[in-house]
Structures are given as structure tokens and as C-alpha cells.
Image (tube, rainbow, N blue to C red):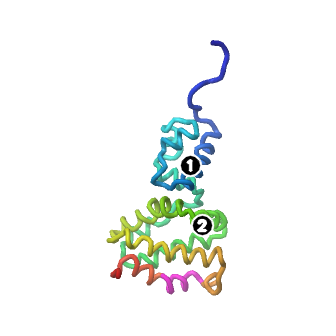
Amino acid sequence: MTGGGRRGRRPGAPDTRAAILAVARERFAAAGFAAVSVRSVAAEAGVDPALVHHYFGSKRDLFLAALEMPVDPREVLAPVIAAGPEGAGERILATILGVWDDDELRLPLLALARGLTDPSGHLLQDGFLPVVIGPVLAELGVDQTERRLPLVISQIIGVLVLRYLARLEPLASMPAEEVVAAVGPTLQRYLTGPLP
């Protein structure tokens, strides 16, 4: 056999990382976090699974990279978690608003928020919640996380959508400290208070 192109999976190349990310975005959006494996992303991208791990580390890291988040929420929320469950509702909201109020970060976050509120719900329900918010509640030692998680995220997403996407006044122009003072106690109740 003469000439011919190489057969098999393609090696790492400058465009390989982008190809993996493109496949991961499509797969996570279509099927959610739990239903997608690193192996399936690698197969569709035409690379070895080891190359996916090389570029992105874990499946969670791949998911966050696919979301194109301008910050890693795990790093941003680490000090909130370290301070314990008491007052965590206010600290979580203050931290999130601090990130969203940064002019350089807001545009990519708006794109992310639109993706998370997609009617299919895969990115939110099967991705963002178990990858980001669920571990925060677990690390805070919160009980009944399966019941608390939807309540917590309802407050966070509600504030983000109304403040940054819908620009509903007076919430849109309210100082972050006032938003935290108004919504933080409800978030704290959802985190640690008695549930009905």
C-alpha cells in the first residue's frame, strides 16, 4: 500500500482542543451532564479519550470549559464554602453579584444564562446543578440537598434573569448590597432553615 493518509484517531493539534469543545457543547446541551461521557465526546471528536483528559482534566472540567464560563465558579465560591453554612446565603449571593457586576465578565455570563434557561433544561438540570451548585451544598454540609437545591437555584437564577437579562427595575439598578439584604435571608432559609 503506498501513500495514503494516516488512519486512526487524529493526534493533538492546535484545532483539536476546539474540536473537542465543540462536540462537548453540543452533547452536553442535547443530553445533559450525566448522559455524556468523556469517551463519547472523544469518539465524536475523533480523538483518544486520554487527549480529552490531557486538555481538560475531569468531565466536570470539560463541562465548565464547554460552558465557556469566564470564571470557575468552584474557585469563586471556595471562600464562601470555607466560611461554613451560617450566613452562606448572603455570601453566595454577594459573590455571584460581584462577578456579574464586573463589566468584563457580564457579556459571556449573559450568554451562559441564556443557555441555562433553555426550555430543554439539560444544561441547568443535568449539568450546572450537579456540577456546580450541588457540590456547594454538599461541601456546606446542607441536609436534604435534593429538596433544597431547586429552591436555592430558583432564587439565584430569578435574581440573575430579572436583574441582568430582563433588566427589571428597581432590581436592575439596585445596589448589590440591597439585593443581598433583600434576597439573602430567603436564600439562607432555603439552605439551612426548616423545610415544609
Residue at 47%, 51% in the rendered image:
35
Query: On screen, 122 above or below 152?
Result: above
Residue type highlighted by circle 2? Ala
Instruction: Give the SS element for disc 2.
Output: helix
Residue at 35%, 80% in the rendered image:
195
Marking on residue 24: 1
Q: Position of residue 103 (x, y in %)?
A: 66, 70
In this orientation, which residue lies closer to the viewer: 182 or 177?
182
Q: Are marks 1 and 2 in contact (CB under 8 Å)?
A: no
Figure quadrant of residue 86: bottom left
Residue type highlighted by circle 1? Ala
Residue at 40%, 78% in the rendered image:
190
The C terminus: image quadrant: bottom left
Asked whether residue 177 is drawn in magenta, I would say: yes
The N terminus: image quadrant: top right
Horizontal side of residue 8 vs 39, given as left or right: right
Q: Position of residue 177 (x, y in %)?
A: 54, 83
Helix, strand or loop: magenta stretch: helix
Please state the extent of the stretch shown in magenta in the rendering.
175-183
Q: Position of residue 7 (x, y in %)?
A: 59, 25
Horizontal side of residue 33 vs 82, given as left or right: right
Query: On screen, 168 above or below 125?
Result: below
Q: Where is residue 181 in the image (x, y as percent from the top left)?
A: 50, 85
What residue is shown with label 2?
113
In this orientation, which residue lies closer to the viewer: 194 or 58?
194
Pointer 1 or 2: first along the chain: 1
- Give the Cα distance between marks 1 and 2: 18 Å
Figure quadrant of residue 146: bottom left
